[in-house]
Image (tube, rainbow, N blue to C red):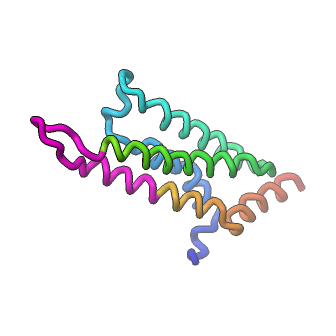
Amino acid sequence: MLPRFFFQPGVIATFLILQVVPLVLYPAASFDPASQEWWLPVVLAVLALIGAIQILRRSLAPWPWYLISFSQGFNIISRLMLVLSRGTVNVNGVQVFNAPYVLMTIIAMLLSAFLIWYTDLPEVRMVMLGGAKQKEA
């Protein structure tokens, strides 16, 4: 299990804010307006930030947690689909393994999987809900 350090409100808030990193970890060419893949990371990042803001506001509703899990899970699914088409690039008529793209994809999927697991831990939710109960009292 994780050390107690990971269950402090400041650490949880940091993870909630930094969760946009795996959502937007793409090569710069992916964010070209002519590309069709720029909008999905942006939408997922906005959804995740909406969820994070609601949690940091100490909302008692469960939907912000679901929104974060949805965004991170959809990130994993979309990256699995994109890595099949972007895993190789055509260089002078030869298909070459696109190592930087595949490495970024694997790192982003691992970070998303970690964030799904981390935000579903009972200790994380209890710490954030504990602040909500104190705020209302």
Q: Position of residue 34 (x, y in %)?
A: 36, 21
Relative horizontal placement of residue 16, taking residue 131 as reference (left or right) = left
The range drawn in magenta is 87-110
Q: Quadrant of the C terminus?
A: bottom right
Relative horizontal placement of residue 29, taking residue 78 as reference (left or right) = left
Q: Choose between 108 and 102: the one closer to the eye.
A: 102
Q: Residue at x 48, y 30 (%)?
A: 39
Q: Choose between 62 and 75: the one closer to the eye.
A: 75
User: In the rendered image of this protein, does residue 35 appear above or below residue 60?
Assistant: above
Q: Residue at x 24, y 51 (%)?
A: 99
Relative horizontal placement of residue 2, taking residue 86 as reference (left or right) = right
Of all residues shown, which one is farthest toward the left? 92
Q: Position of residue 26 (x, y in %)?
A: 37, 41
Total residue callouts = 0
Q: Residue at x 12, y 36 (%)?
A: 93
Q: Was residue 80 drawn as part of the magenta stretch in this picture? A: no
> Residue 37, located in which quarter of the rendered image?
top left
Residue 108 seen: yes
Of all residues shown, which one is farthest toward the top? 34
Residue 56 seen: no
Q: Residue at x 10, y 35 (%)?
A: 92
Q: Quadrant of the N terminus?
A: bottom right
User: In the rendered image of this protein, does residue 126 appear above or below residue 75?
Assistant: below
